[in-house]
Image (cartoon, grey):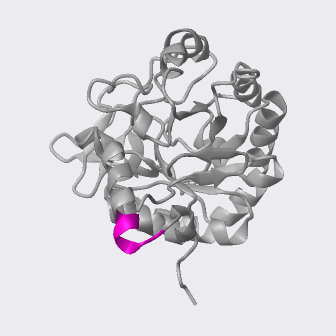
Amino acid sequence: MNPDLSVRLGSLTLKNPIMTASGCFGYGLELIDLLDLNQLGGIVSKSLTLHKRMGTPPHRIFETASGMLNAIGIENIGVEAYLNEKLPHLSRYDIAIVANVMGNTLEEYAATAARFRGVRRINAIEVNISSPNTKKGGMHFGVDPELTYQVIRAVKDATDRPVIAKLSPNVTDIVQIAKRAVDGGADMLSLINTLWSLAIDHWNGKPILGNVTGGLSGPAIKPVALRMVHQVSRALPVPVIGMGGIANLFDVIEFMMAGASAVQIGTANFYDPTVSVRLVRELRDYCSMRKIDRISSLIGALQSS
C-alpha cells in the first residue's frame, strides 16, 4: 500500500503535511548533512525583517521543567541576504518554501513581504504577529483584533503569494483574532506561537533571560495548541496549520484530527534534528498499517459530540 500523504492548503499543495516551524530549523540549510530536505512537505524560514537584526542579549534559551523558554529577539540576516544567499540553495530542493516575515510597523511588514513579490520559489508568506520576544511588532499586533486586521491587510496588498497569519496563544479569544486575520485577507492560519513566560534565578533574584520574559514551547503547550486548532478550524473555512509541542507520530495525528491540514515541527528539532523526516516515514507506515488511503481523511476527524 502506498498511501497518499498529500494535503491541500488552499492553492498550495504539500506532498505531505510535515513542515518545520520558523526559528527552529535555521534557514533550512544548516542540517542538509544530516537529513534529506526533499522528504519534507515544506520548511518555514526564520522570521525575516527588512534589515538585519542582532536579537536580544543573552541568555536567550532556558530549559524549564516542562518545556523550553526562549527570547531570541528575531535575530536574522534580513530579507535581502535571505534572497541572495539562502533561497538560491534552498531552491534546489523539492519542497514548499514559506517565508516568515515580521516588522516593527505596518509599513515594515508590508515592505518585507513585498520583496517576495514575483519570487516564484516562495510558495507562501507567513506573517509573524505572535512573537512575544520583541518590544515592537510581533505579539503586539497579534493580540489586538484591529491591528491583526490591519497588518494582514497591509501584507496581503503588498504580496502576490498566499498569506498565512501566525497567531499568538496569549489572547482571550483566539477565534476573534483568527476571524479578523481572515477578514484582512489571510488565506491560511498557523497556530500557535509560544506562551509568554518568565524564568527566575532564585540565587540572585534576577530573570534568567536577557530579555526578562520569553516564549514557552515544547510538550507543555500541546494541549493549549490542540484546543485552539480545534476552535479555529471549526469556526473558519480556511486551512489551519497546527504547531505546539509536536514531537512524535501521535502528536501529528491528534493535530490533524483536531482540524489541522498540516503541522509544523518546532522545539523537537533542537534535541532531534532528524525528527521531521522521521515523522514523514512514520506517518506513511501508520497509514499503511491502518489502511488509510489518504492522510487528508484525518483532517477534522475528531468526534467531539
Lateral position of residue 180 relative to residue 224, left or right = right
Q: Is residue 266 above or below residue 107?
A: below
Q: Is residue 20 above or below residue 46?
A: below
User: Which of the pair 175/38 is nearer the observer?
Assistant: 38
The answer to if 288 sits in the magenta stretch is yes
User: Which of the pair 288/139 is nearer the observer?
Assistant: 288
Q: Is residue 199 above or below residue 50?
A: below
* Image quadrant containing the N terminus: bottom left
User: Which of the pair 52/204 is nearer the observer?
Assistant: 52
Identify the main secondary structure in magenta: helix
Lateral position of residue 24 relative to residue 136, left or right = left
The residue under the point 66% across, 36% down is 124
User: In this rendering, does residue 143 appear at all?
Assistant: no
The residue under the point 42% across, 46% down is 215
Counting from the top left corner in percent of width and height, residue 204 is at: 19, 39
The residue under the point 73% across, 46% down is 11
Looking at the rendering, which quadrant does residue 283 occupy? bottom left
The span shown in magenta is: 286-292
Counting from the top left corner in percent of width and height, residue 82 is at: 54, 16
